[in-house]
Image: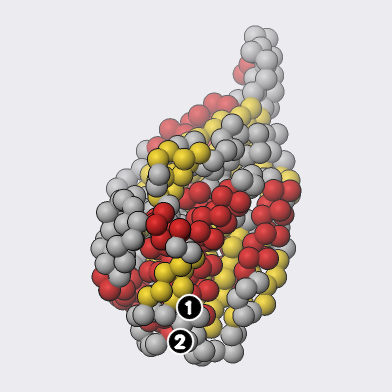
Amino acid sequence: MAQGTQLCNGLDWREWASRGGTMQDDRTLSTIDAAAMLAQVKAWSAINTGTANLAGLAEQAAMLTEAFAVLPGHVALVDPADVTAIAADGTAFDKPHGKHLVVRVRPEANRRILLTGHMDTVFPSDHAFQRLQWLDGDTLNGPGVADMKGGIAVMLHALMAFEASGHSAGLGYDVLINSDEETGSLASAALIAELAAGKLAALTYEPAALPDGTLAHERGGTGNYSITFTGKSAHAGRNPHEGRNAIVAAADLILRLKALESDEITINPAKLEGGAANNVVPDHAVLRFNVRPRTVEAGAAFDLALTRLLAGIAAEHEVSTHRHGGVTRPPKKVDARAQQLFDLVRACGAELGQEIRWQPSGGVCDGNNIAACGVPVVDTMGVRGGAIHSPDEFLIVPSLAERALLSARVIERLAQGALS
């Protein structure tokens, strides 16, 4: 559906809301409350939920617990898994995260699906971008409105419509809304895998890849590494030959890493920390970098190559090295079964007057993790919007209802036997 104010039944969304904010669609027997969806997005986006803002995440989790309690299942907050990170001095430390929301509905059902989203944003509590504002009659600017407070509202109201459809008895589902997707889902990866196991299909509520509603199809993978170098300090004038320069060793590795780039993998050295006074040979450095493999094989090959590089650096520069991290989101390929799910979404969109397209994406999300479990997933079922991860982030408000109706229809079709 092109950007604009028209919903699939032809009503302007403001007129629709003024009539009570509901849509009855005989084909899905769904009820979508547009006004309630917008109110929730505004309330949720007013809470700062940067991944490190544990207080804000706790407040958001409490609101989501109340909101999802309308579903006929069990709602719980699950503790995050332990995660370690590397400080600038090279020491490992525990990195705290917020709790994750899990909803389980009809766990005894033979046909079960997974729906996922995230409550965290990329904007920390001290970021200047904290307020909502209307850009025009249809477009709301604010932190997380698209990525993905709007997506959470789409998920919830699609499930509410599905439960009211009369077709829900045969389909069970789990919902996961994690607190750490924006930093790689390290504190929820095991939970994602646990909930994905045995599922028929999965839907994830990242915003559409383009403002026109285009879905992300295949995705590359990603991994983050921290390499600590320990050398030997010495006076830069009196006896530099007795030192072992950790900064030089790290710089050598940067150049060798870039030489590994190919059509199958990109490597981004992002931060180099360490050193001391100008007259001291530095004995410490930490290099942080990101890799983007386009295939599983490329990620595995890089990991082996890194092992060889570190051994060579250690020998040539007479330093010791320690590696932390790795590929945490494998590339997401779309196999025949996953393509069937994309085709189902497109068919449901056509029934509703929504034209659904897709294209490959260089970004990553929890859909990568789900696909790695062998479960078909469409991971951009959220709102239409754009400029995510920036102060220009925006939500196209009519898409709240249109995407909720799309999801409700897809879920109903899955309940009726699609993707068997």
Viewer-proximal residue among 398 and 355: 398
Residue at x 60% of width, y 60% of height: 178
Viewer-proximal residue among 370 and 396: 396
Name the image quarter holding residue 271. top right
Q: Residue furthest front?
A: 19
Viewer-proximal residue among 56 and 226: 56
Measuring from the top left, give residue 409's x and y in whole percent: 38, 75
Badge 1 or badge 2: first in the primary sequence: 1
Measuring from the top left, give residue 338's x and y in whole percent: 35, 73
Q: Which residue is mark 1?
A: 162
From this viewpoint, is residue 283 visible?
yes
Measuring from the top left, give residue 237's x and y in whole percent: 65, 9
Q: Which residue is mark 2?
A: 167
Amino acid of disc 2:
His
Quadrant of the drawing holding the N terminus? bottom left
Compared to 262, does 313 lie above or below?
A: above
Give me the C-alpha separation between circle 1 and circle 2.
7 Å
What is the secondary structure assignment of the residue under circle 2?
loop
What is the secondary structure assignment of the residue under circle 1?
helix
Viewer-proximal residue among 253 and 171: 171
